[in-house]
Amino acid sequence: MKLSEIKNVLAGLDNVAFVLPDGTKVPEHFHVTEVGVVNKHFIDCGGTSRYESKVNFQLWNAHDYDHRLTPGKLLNIIHLCEQKLSINDNLEVEVEYQGSTIGRYALDFDGASFVLVSTVTDCLAKDGCGVPAAKQKASLQELSVNQESCCTPGGGCC
């Protein structure tokens, strides 16, 4: 989701909830401890220089049961960060959340909650790095067999 989409969604919500990829909810007493811009300048395995920017939210399970983050509070945090950091609201948002390790997630919205979406690594230079394309799997039952070219016992083809 882009930051602009998140702001639009927040404007119509009564509460803020995040759901992990396995369907469990981030505890209601979470805090957003950071909002920032993460810039990544790198060279892919094909030698191409690339640049990527994302807005980053860091969620923290605070064990602070007396405070809840409201949509209005989160919007205020976002607006402050947009002003102080000159954040472009067309950037994609990634979320950091610590389970057994710190995970980085894409973000979606299911109509009631923000959903953390697992991300995967990928090769950006498949055409130039030499890794062969994945072979398509087929079962033996799907293969058509030409009966005339089949060997039969005593047929003399072997």
Image (spheres, rainbow, N blue to C red):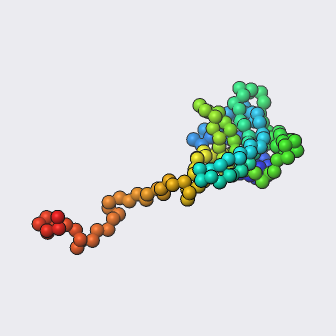
Does 151 sit above or below residue 15? Answer: below
Residue at (72, 28) in percent of width and height: 62
Question: Toward which corner of the image does residue 61 lie, by quadrant?
Answer: top right
Give left or right: position of 71 versus 148: right
Q: How many numbered marks appear?
A: 0
User: In x, y percent, where is residue 58?
Assistant: 72, 37
User: In x, y percent, where is residue 145?
Assistant: 28, 68
* Of the pair 138 and 40, the residue shown nearer to us: 40
Residue at (14, 69) in percent of width and height: 155
Residue at (77, 43) in percent of width and height: 37
Question: Toward which corner of the image does residue 20 lie, by quadrant?
Answer: top right
Query: Most extreme residue toward the front, as rendered?
Result: 47
Quadrant for the C terminus, please.
bottom left
Give left or right: position of 84 versus 151: right
* Of the pair 61 and 128, the residue shown nearer to us: 128
Question: Toward which corner of the image does residue 146 lie, by quadrant?
Answer: bottom left
Residue 53 appears in view: yes
